[in-house]
Amino acid sequence: MISSSSQSWDMKEDWGAMGSQHVIARSVLVFVLGLTCMSTIWGSLGYAQKPIVYVAPIEGVIDLGLAPFVQRAIEEATSADASAVILDINTFGGRVDAAVLIRDALLKSPVLTVAFVNKRAISAGALISLATEKLVMADGGTIGAATPVQIGLPGTPAQPVAEKTVSYMRKEFRATAESRNRPPLIAEAMVDADVEIPGLIEKGKLLTLTTKEALDANVADFQANSLDALLLLLNLPNAEIRDLTETWAESLVRFLTHPVVSSLLMTLGIMGIIVEIRVPGFGLPGAMGLVSLGLFFWGHTLVRLAGLEEFLLVSVGLILVAMEIFFIPGFGIAGIFGILALMGGLGLSLIGSGANWDSILSALGQVSLSIFIAILVALFLLRYFQRLPFGKRLLLKTSLLSKEGYASSPEGDQEWLGKRGTAATDLHPSGIAHLNGDRVDVVSDGDFINSGQPVEVVRVDGNRIVVRLSTEPAEGGHS
């Protein structure tokens, strides 16, 4: 009897537990179904999340600092799962290498890219526009005229480039058009005047299309005169617009990498270091030179032009040039290799992807001009700085006389003061002079003096015997 009652009681407990599990399961099922129904109703009532569209302006000169901005726009749009990135384009063009970087980023973009040409996409702007998935133009817009040119000195007209450069850009435009299913021959005609398209452009003319012509030629997809109209064409009328602007760092980089600014930074950097080496201990020229070169390399490093190799080349070049000017008589191997290292390091910092011989020669010309101006200005400052009003205020006027117990040079060197002789070597500005029959290491007072010319010792600074060109014959002879 006891055994039978225990078994019956166990069976009742099992049935009760199973019933509780069924109740819990039904409750969970009802809860899940309720959430599903509520989300469906919520979405049907129009509370679904709006699509996101990023808008980035492409204005002014297309330079290397613009490429990181466009790349950031694509990356942010991808992270936000945006529906599109719209480039609001109004530019007459700019650097080819910058346009190539932007073009590559657009072709690899996982987000829909749209070019809104409002009002013009000329030269490099045309390549950027062709690289987007959708090309929309405003009424009165233009696109094309993309033949590469060589920019000369300020105030001089642009010069034509070599045929191989035109050929490269022609194929770059064609490949871009083919990847976006646009007429490749029309893209080539924007670059090369030798491309002829019957009924559209004759040979010898460079192709530029208006909005209507671009639509008829299947280059542009739509016409829209406002951003709202463009969003309507993209079936995104209620999209959340996120306007992108350059950060202060991106704006600063664009400023520092501008050709005029970068040339000025190179000139100031080299000039300041030369003056500091020539007049050690002053501080201001050296600090200005280091800051200028630092800003130059910082800006070009951020746009992926300069790196450790370029920095080391420039450093070695400055050291070799300083040795040649101030320690090695004449002008020889150290000076030649120093200038070559300077030109190589600074020139490579100006050249980006898509570089060709024309852009390389342009960069070398820009660097050569900066070095030449820097040397001229440095020589002027070294000769006339103490005579200028602001120079007099900066220089220390207190004299430390030897009769008061101060001595900055060996007593034996003071005997050369006022002596006349001849330059035994070229003084550029350091070298050797014959004074009273002795060969003496001297430094010219700013001017370069050729071998054999008469010189006169004007002062003794520390261990340096400073001479200048003399109008009187040398005293005694020389051996």
Image: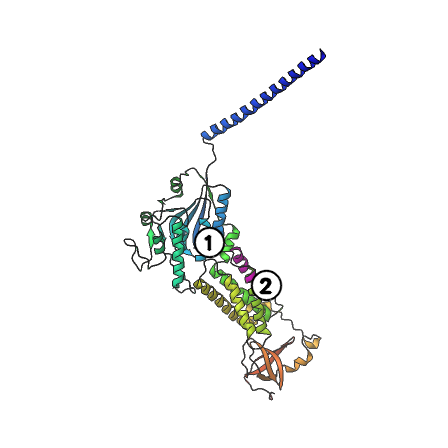
Q: Crowding at label 2, few (<14), some or many (≥20) Cα neighbours within 10 Å?
A: some
The amino acid on which the numbered mark 1 sits, given as a three-letter code, is Leu
53, 139: nearer the viewer: 53
Work out which residue is located at the far top of the displayed protein and give it: 1
Magenta stretch: helix, strand or loop mostly: helix
Q: Please give the residue where the numbered disc 2 appears in the rendered image.
A: 287
| Image side of residue 386 versus residue 153, left or right | right
Identify which amino acid the numbered label 2 is placed on: Ala
* Secondary structure of residue under mark 1: helix
Q: Could you tell me how far apart the alpha carbons at marks 1 and 2 are, in whole angstroms?
A: 34 Å
Q: In the picture shown, does residue 128 fall above or below 11? A: below
Say whether residue 454 is visible: yes
Q: Position of residue 378 (x, y in %)?
A: 54, 70
349 sits to left or right of 170: right
Per the rendered image, the range of residues in magenta is 296-309
Residue at 68% x, 81% y: name it.
412
Q: Quadrant of the C terminus?
A: bottom right
- Residue plotted at (50% across, 46% down): 75
Q: In the picture, residue 269 is in which quadrant?
A: bottom right
The residue pinned by badge 1 equals: 101
Rendered location of residue 37, percent (x, y): 49, 26
Outermost residue toward the left?
A: 199
Q: Is residue 298 magenta?
A: yes
Number of other residues with Cα within 10 Å of mark 1, as a class: few under 14, some 14 to 19, many 20 or more: many
Q: Whole-percent x and y of residue 403?
A: 70, 77
